[in-house]
Amino acid sequence: MADQPVVRRRVVKTGISEERTNNSKVQSQYQPYKDAAWGFINHWYPALFSNELPEDHVEGIQICGIPIVLRRVDGKIYALKDQCLHRGVRLSEKPMCFDKETISCWYHGFTFNLESGLLSTIVANPNDKLVGTTGITTYPVQEVAGMIFVFVREDDFPDADVPPLSEDLPVRFPENSERFPHPLWPAAPSVLDENAVALGMHRTGFGNWRIACENGFDNAHILVHKDNTIIHAMDWVLPLGILPTADDCIATVEDEKGPKGLVQWLFTEKWAPVMENKQLGLKIENTKGRPYRTSVVLPGVLMVENWPEEHVVQYEWYVPITDDTHEYWEVLVRVCPSDADRKKFQYRFDRVYKPLALHGFNDCDLYAREAMQNFYADGTGWDDEQLVATDVSPITWRKVASRWNRGIAKPGRGVAGALKTTSLRFKDTADGLRPGYKVPKIPDEE
Ligand code: FES
């Protein structure tokens, strides 16, 4: 034993530093956010693009652990809880509609009124005493610019308290041009503008919605885009990161009526772009300025103004499906008054921005968020992370979201993904079906 060499290890201190910006006092100001693994409820969320729900079509989705079925009848869209109150199957798995007013459960025939959710009959048991005494929750719906939004609410949330969609969308221009001037670009469009066209896509991200959301406006994350094709094809200057230089580098938006969130004063003297790291021999050499500004509002809507080109705005939503999956929405909005404008925008979207920005560039965000998931999956990551000065953005967001959310979603019950180790989850995965947002339909008998 004596001739065995002694191995000396240099011990690097890995304890949590007192210098971190999110000490326990700061953390206590965003406890509700830490509790919101399943999302914030009683908010408006995008559900589908309009073209995903043609006339008389039925589709099932899941938001904040709540299963929701949508049906379009004579152009009008209805949304109800997609969980039969008899024995819990999803109505959307095998849609059965006998008239324009109802949707029936394909299993034992419980039939619900689309408008009220009331149990209006049972196919083979119309005189049962349960009929007319109970029902399923309905959800307010609004369709704008080719997108369908649903107000995802608790079962007892009153109709009278449903806020307008505009309160859950980013700040608008030109109404806010004086408050949030944007001299470097034209006013950012909104899905609520006349002639607004929203083009985009949505896909399932495998991670909690909060770590996805924070990525979008975290000014240090742009490092993941350093080598992206669109950056170099366009010769855009994208800094290695952007450092805050003033205490008021972020404006919170907390008007009584209106969206709640924050706007970052990017591309002003309040933030300094970092173009070089001499120690590592890194330098940004591109030459074309690409100024943009990010903001975020409840329930987790990112707006990137002046991106990826002038007159266009990029919106992103990170819609919680479960506590470990979210639906990632990437949408470009432009006001297109004429058919020719629409065609031009669609062409540019198909040929340039979908492949290079919504894929390409944003694919890097998706894998970066998924790379964080294991650290946060059991909730301990929120305590163990050691944040720095650039993380002022997520910290501010967490505090605002904690102050103004309309409710913390409860963990899903009796729904896909509520339990991670059910035989069905394993079966679906083995069959090549990833956990996702839309309900797969039971195939018709062949
Ligand atoms: Fe729906 Fe029985 S489960 S009617």
Image: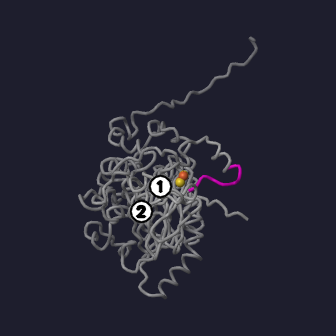
- Residue 228 in percent (x, y) is at 58, 63
Query: At 36% from the left edge and 43% from the top edge, which residue is drawn?
Result: 32
Task: Decide: is 236 above or below 418.
Answer: below
Q: Tell me how far mark 2 sits from mark 1, CA to CA.
A: 10 Å
How packed mark 2 is, by other alpha carbons closer than 10 Å (few <14, some 14-19, many 20 or more), is many
Question: Foreground: 315 or 266?
Answer: 315
Let me know if residue 267 is in the magenta part: no
Which is more toward the observer, 68 or 180?
68
Residue 17 occupies which quadrant of the picture? top left
Q: Give residue 40's position: percent from left, percent from top.
A: 39, 51
Callout 2 secondary element: strand
**Amino acid residing under circle 1:** Ile
Q: Residue furthest front?
A: 127
Local SS, label 1? strand
Q: Which residue is mark 1?
A: 63
Can residue 161 be seen here? Answer: yes
Q: Where is residue 149, by image quadrant?
A: bottom left
What secondary structure do most residues of the magenta stretch adopt?
loop
Query: In the figure, is residue 433 to the left or right of 302?
Result: right
Q: Is residue 7 left or right of residue 204?
A: right
Q: Is residue 343 above or below residue 220?
A: below
Name the image colouring: one colour
- For residue 150, the mark is 2
CB atoms of marks 2 and 1 within 8 Å: yes
Residue 431 in the magenta stretch? The answer is yes
- Please state the extent of the stretch shown in magenta in the rendering: 429-436
Task: Say which amino acid is labelled 2.
Answer: Val
